[in-house]
Image (cartoon, grey):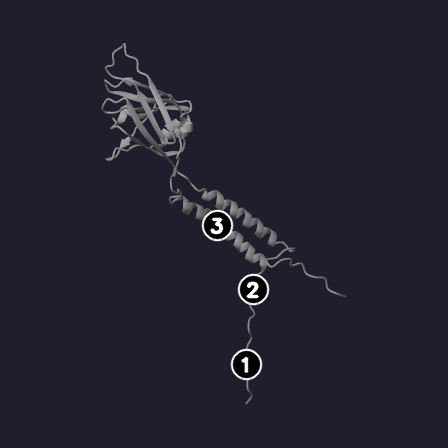
Amino acid sequence: MSKNKIKSFKRIVKPPSQSVILSLMALILIVGAPALIAMIDNEDSTHDLIVKSDISSYFDDGRFYGVWHEKPDDVTVSYDGLVDGNTVVITADYYDYSGSFDIGDLDVSLLTDLAKLELRSSEILNVGFRTSIILEDGYRIQSSISEDGVLTFSPSSVDLIKISNSEIFNIRITPTDPTSVIELEFTPYYQYTIPYGEIIIGATGVLLMVCAIFATPWFGIGGITAKPRRSK
């Protein structure tokens, strides 16, 4: 009785070629980059708000004036203003009746890309129409006030469009009680957004170029892969 010899054959699995690996990498990059950008765009891509600690340069061409109710016609009110960092002090030589303190011809770039502008006052203020940011076409950006008296201007998308079409703006501040001096502290906040999309697309383009270079016969993942000549 003859024994059947059973021969076992081992199948040798060749690793994928360099071109296959690089093509797969390129495919992953092409498909994955837009998906990653879409995922990030659906999330909040903004970081902490940036605060400007010195806004005095925006007041270089500013002028100080006001409107007083029930003021006698023969009374002239003179104003003076001092800007130091983010603090503005306005004085008037008249306070018998309630009135407003206005700052005009301010550089509108202070409001460009503004997330919010907080305003602290040494006096209790009237809000709404009497205390507002006024653009040069008369458009007003209204404010809200918190329990601790902090006034906040939060421009809407429409407000930002109006701001982009302006060169200067005015601020009207109206205290509830008559006063001859008012101190204001401005704190502007700006959103800082990291351009994730541009970064990802740029990095993807560089990696695709690297894949294309190493897919050529002259270069390989481990270096130059050109075959040496056979000796005769």
Total numbered labels placed on residues in the image? 3
Disc 2 versus disc 1: nearer the observer: 2
Name the residue: 46% across, 43% down: 197
Find the distance from the CA under tag 3 to the CA under tag 1.
Answer: 48 Å
Q: Foreground mark, 3 or 1?
A: 3
> Farthest front residue?
93
Q: Amino acid at mark 2?
A: Pro
Give me the residue at 58% from left, 51% from top.
210
Q: Secondary structure at mark 2?
A: loop
| Mark 3 or mark 2: whose residue is earlier in sequence | 2
Q: Where does the N terminus fall, quadrant-wise?
A: bottom right
- The residue labelled by disc 2 is 15
Q: Is residue 196 left or right of residue 99?
A: right
Q: What residue is shown with label 1?
A: 6
Can you see residue 30? yes
Q: Is residue 101 above or below residue 6?
A: above
Q: Nearer the viewer, residue 230 or 77?
A: 77
| Circle 3/circle 1 CB separation < 8 Å | no
Q: Is residue 158 visible?
A: no
Pinpoint residue 120: horizontal percent, then vertical percent: 30, 32
* Residue holding disc 3: 31
Question: Residue at the spot x=30%, y=15% of the render?
Answer: 77
| Element assignment for label 3 | helix
In this view of the protein, which residue sits in the foreground, 43 or 146? 146
The image shows residue 72 at horizontal and vertical percentages of 25, 11
10 Å crowding of disc 2: few (<14), some (14-19), many (20+)? few
Pick the quarter of the image with the C terminus. bottom right
Q: Measured from the top left, where is residue 154 in percent x and y?
A: 33, 33
As shown in the figure, which amino acid type bears the numbered disc 1?
A: Ile
